[in-house]
Amino acid sequence: MRTYSFLTVLLWSCMFHAIHMMPSEQRTNKHSRSERITGLSENDGKTLHRTKRGWMWNQFFLLEEYTGPDTQYVGKLHTDQDKGDGNLKYILTGDGAGSLFIIDENTGDIHAAKKLDREEKSLYVLRAKAIDRKTGRQVEPESEFIIKIHDINDNEPKFTKDMYTASIPEMAGVGTSVIQVTATDADDANYGNSAKVVYSILQGQPYFSVDPETGIIKTALPDMSRENREQYQVVIQAKDMGGQMGGLSGTTTVNITLTDVNDNPPRFPQSTYQFSSPESAPPGTPLGRIKANDPDVGENAEIEYSISNGDGSDMFDIVTDKDTQEGIITVKKHLDFENKMLYTLRVEATNTHPDPRFLQLGPFKDTALVKISVEDIDEPPVFSRPWYLIEVDEDAKEGSIIGQVVAQDPDITKNAIKYSVDRHTDLDRIFNIYSGNGSLFISKPLDREETPWHNITVIATEINNPKQTSQIPVFIRILDINDHAPEFAKYYETFVCENAKAGQLIQTVSAVDKDEPPRGHKFFFELVPEFALHPNFSIVDNKDNTAGIMTRRNGYSRSKMSTYLLPIIIFDNDYPIQSSTGTLTIRVCACDSRGNMQSCNAEALLLPAGLSTGALVAILLCIIILLVLVVLFTALKRQRKKEPLIISKDDVRDNIVTYNDEGGGEEDTQAFDIGALRNPEAREESKMRRDVIPETIFQIRRTAPLWENIDVQDFIHRRLKENDSDPAAPPYDSLATYAYEGNDSIANSLSSLESLTTEGNQDYDYLSDWGPRFKKLADMYGGEDSDRD
């Protein structure tokens, strides 16, 4: 509906009265008014009057979104100076002048050239003036007027978001606020009901409702369960014009999610579970999984599993898998089929985060019965102890039993057990064991001072099933026996001054003992009985394992006796008492008045008394020069090269004469030194055979010298026969081979390749008769049968 408002604008022109006292005029665009100004002139003081008249305006109003065929008429500008003769020209300036608003410069009519939108601009400020076309002067001062745009309902309400997302806990009460939606209308809220918005719900009933004025969405049904339905989509409409017919509207979508609360207890899907476990399962072995179902999610579905009761609560355990919310049943202790074959457990599943608001619904836990059967397997032997400690005296005889280990088959069959020693832990084969009863005995002498502890491993094996074996450590402690005599702690260099006084301490000695008596060492010192009343020295036992050597007379002379030997007996206090005699060498030395040693050499007494220090230095230098000359001479002599008997490219150890060149006959004496054959002493002495180690060291036989004129051929034959019969001669002219033992060996062949017997029925006792050089083989092959086991 178009409404045209025609407002007549009366324009009053101001009539100006020229007054020579006022250089300028004052104008106003307000309502017409008269202003009286009173003043005194310089001459006569007359009163001056000025009459002011201005434009008279009313506010223009214009409807937005005009869609008519013609331009929209706004209003008319007019002044009383306009006589209608076209001398005046109306000019419009300001907001939109010339583009949005057009004025007829002759009549002053104003039109809107375009469609206007109040939401873009609701107020336009313009200025108008009238100009005389001839003079170009303003007949009226510039005046300002306002054009206001009236609103129409051309904008629908718009929500701040195209889609809203909200959440609310399940089981919430009726009227619980969910979210507030807001819609805005761009129309003028102060003009009519175009911007008055009312909210309503188009989709989402009967679960939710909306406040028509505030847009707050609330729950409309009680006890909505997330487990039944989790997502809801609600459509809200916002309509202007107060919701009346003809108003514009907009919609938005609200996605509402019900969040979980712990309103459901866990429940096992079955009441009984069956599992089995081999009796050899180590602690911590998982046997199976059980799970209680909880329709809740997140922490509300977290479950803790425990064993409430049952005869297997000590043998089994259950832990919770936090990722899958399952209970894992594991072995807690070692199982024994022979002891118990079936266990029963009562397992309980409990929510870890119960909600106090829903405790009235019942206990938030559930129980199930778990039965576990133990499976029998063939187990290895079990020793009676986790380890064994055996103590034995170091003087125990070979073959003495020092202890026993006991193992048995834990299975029902109770298979027989045999014992053996792990030879990797007893490389010297000092100990052995009876395979039938596990008794340990000594095979070699013991020495605590060499090895105080022996750690061996005993193996128990089922005879019917050798794969079933067990090992046990056996710690053998060698107890000390007083079998070592004490001796001096170190070598003592003792001297006595020539001017020593009687009763003077010249040395303190101490002793050590390889034995370790339980009460500690206690040593006693005394002179041997032959020197009990030694005229020169005495010994004083300090009762602290030390003794002092004292002088018994005044003054000693190097010229008479430069060294004294003092034998001392050292006893211990253990049983049996051990003692040893140590000889202390005491040298007589020259000392100063303070007792500091100066010289202990007896040769120093033979030097002339008047020999000066310079002479002594000269003598010493001469001796050093002579020694250097001797060393140089010896070195030069060793550097001389010997002319070899044989010069050959293929020189070997043996003296082989090559015949690849023609010699000079019997007169050629350069090819071989015949004197070496004629001289019996020319051969090397005490040369032993390099291919064998003789049982007995033979003495080199000295042969009678031969005459000078003996025939060389005869001489060579004699020497050849002599060396062939001498087992100690080095076989330079033979090649030693070890592939064949020889016809004259009493041991025959040591190889087992040609033997028709097996290792099981061979007797190696004869190795013990071959002497000490075959003792190692005798020990290795002559032991008990249990060692080979």
Image (cartoon, rainbow, N blue to C red):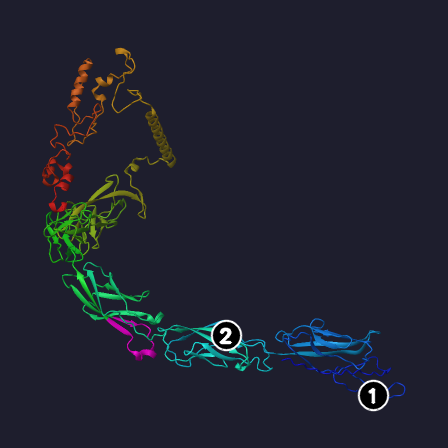
Q: Residues within 10 Å of mark 2 (few under 14, many from 20)?
A: some
Left or right: 2, with 448 as reference point: right
Q: Disc 2 residue type?
A: Thr
Q: Residues within 10 Å of mark 1 (few under 14, many from 20)?
A: few
Along the line of sight, which residue is nearer the eye, 277 or 557? Answer: 277
Asked whether residue 533 is in view, the answer is: no
Rendering quarter of residue 675: top left
Q: Residue at x 49, y 81 (%)?
A: 212
Along the line of sight, which residue is nearer the eye, 715 or 318? Answer: 318
Left or right: 574, with 13 as reference point: left
Cα–Cα gap, marks 1 and 2: 71 Å
Along the line of sight, which residue is nearer the eye, 481 or 406? Answer: 406
Q: Are marks 1 and 2 in contact (CB under 8 Å)?
A: no
Q: Disc 1 residue type?
A: Thr
Asked whether residue 17 is in view, the answer is: yes
- The circle drawn on residue 38 is 1
Instruction: Choose mark 1 or mark 2, whichever is in front.
Output: 2
Q: Secondary structure at mark 2?
A: strand
Above or below residue 521? Residue 7 is: below
Q: Which stretch did the figure color magenta?
A: 348-367
Residue 362 is one of the magenta-drawn residues: yes
Q: Residue at x 81, y 80 (%)?
A: 81
Above or below residue 188? Residue 563 is: above
Q: Position of residue 625 (x, y in %)?
A: 37, 30
Between discs 1 and 2, the one toward the N terminus: 1
Most extreme residue toward the right, as rendered?
43
Left or right: 518, with 664 as reference point: left
Q: Position of residue 454 (x, y in %)?
A: 19, 50
Q: Position of residue 630 (x, y in %)?
A: 34, 28
Q: Quadrant of the N terminus?
A: bottom right
Most extreme residue toward the front, as rendered?
69
State the residue position of label 2: 251
